[in-house]
Amino acid sequence: MDIHKLAIVHEKAKLGKNVSVGPFSIIGENVKIGAGSKIGAHVLIEGWTEIGEKCEFFTGAVIGTIPQDLKFAGEKTILKIGKHSIFREYVTVNRGTELGGGQTLIGDNTLLMAYTHIAHDCIIGNNVIFGNAANLAGHIEVGDFAIIGGLTGIHQFVRIGAYSIIGGCSAVTQDVIPYAKAAGNRPNRLYGLNITGLKRHKFSPEAIRNLQKAYRILFRSNLNVSQAVRKIEEEIPNSPEVNYLVHFIQNSKRGICKHKPENHEFEE
């Protein structure tokens, strides 16, 4: 281990092999840090926080602090972070709350750019990217490979589907379906499927065609959401990608963002 003489590491903290801790950083009593992780200068990691291997924390990051929730009464709650994730300057991540399940979860290979905030009880998948100053309220779920643009705010309890992308400076108050592009505020709207992202992630032409058909049924058929879902299930029964999309919609509690009417980019 490489711990700077000006760092403060609690004697009960558990640090893996080859962990480095920079000057003026503070590591709390109940923190566990995986092998090969790098803690920069002026970083605070406290609470019941568990960090995977080869993560990196830049100057000013504040990790594992208590939730910003007036109902929180000091109970033991958890933050778990996967492997190979990067937390840039002044990122803040809070632990969970008892009422919200007791834990905040962040997956592997996640990039949180400067000033990103992850509130209590959020569940973040793998390979997610957060632009600068993206802000998540409590109880938000973000699927694998999603991209959240800079200066975007997301309302509590909203879900962001896998492989979706949200443009910068957006305000998201309803669920963003998987595989889609979304942007804007008052309200946030969908701008078609994330075709470029799907191709980059090697989705088959058949999978993309099925998703395009499902998208058209949802937003171009003059059916309500329940009717559209039934039609999708009848007409595209054996597509794993479409099945995930349908399941996501069926489990929405806040409703889903709608398609911007004059936009036709989903036909790419």
Image (tube, rainbow, N blue to C red):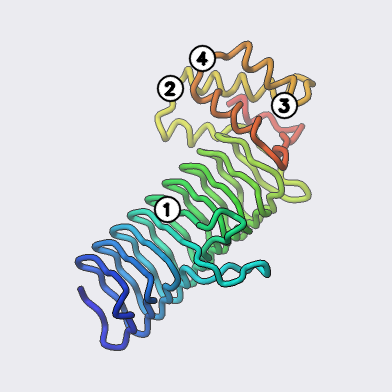
Q: Is residue 199 above or below residue 9?
A: above
Image label count? 4
Q: Which residue bears the numbered disc 1?
A: 110
Q: Residues within 10 Å of mark 1 (few under 14, many from 20)?
A: many
Q: Which residue bears the numbered disc 4?
A: 238
Q: Which residue bears the numbered disc 3?
A: 219
- SS for dot 4: loop
Q: Of the residues shown, which amino acid type is indicated by label 1?
A: Thr
The residue lying at 61 percent from left, 71 percent from top is 73
Q: Is residue 179 above or below residue 87?
A: above
The first of marks 2 and 3 along the sequence is 2
Instruction: Residue 233: give x, y in percent of width and height.
Output: 62, 16
Mark 1 → mark 4, Cα distance in angstroms: 31 Å
Q: Of the residues shown, which amino acid type is indicated by label 3?
A: Phe
Residue 204, disc? 2
User: Which one is in front in this view, the residue at disc 3 or the one at disc 4?
Assistant: 4
The first of marks 3 and 1 along the sequence is 1
Whether the residues at callouts 3 and 4 have beta carbons within 8 Å, the answer is no
Instruction: Residue 134: give x, y in percent of width and height.
Output: 58, 59
The first of marks 2 and 4 along the sequence is 2
User: Which one is in front in this view, the residue at disc 1 or the one at disc 4?
Assistant: 4
Q: Is residue 40 left or right of residue 217?
A: left
Mark 2 → mark 4, Cα distance in angstroms: 14 Å
User: Which one is in front in this view, the residue at disc 1 or the one at disc 2?
Assistant: 1
- Where, by quadrant of the figure, is residue 176 drawn? top right
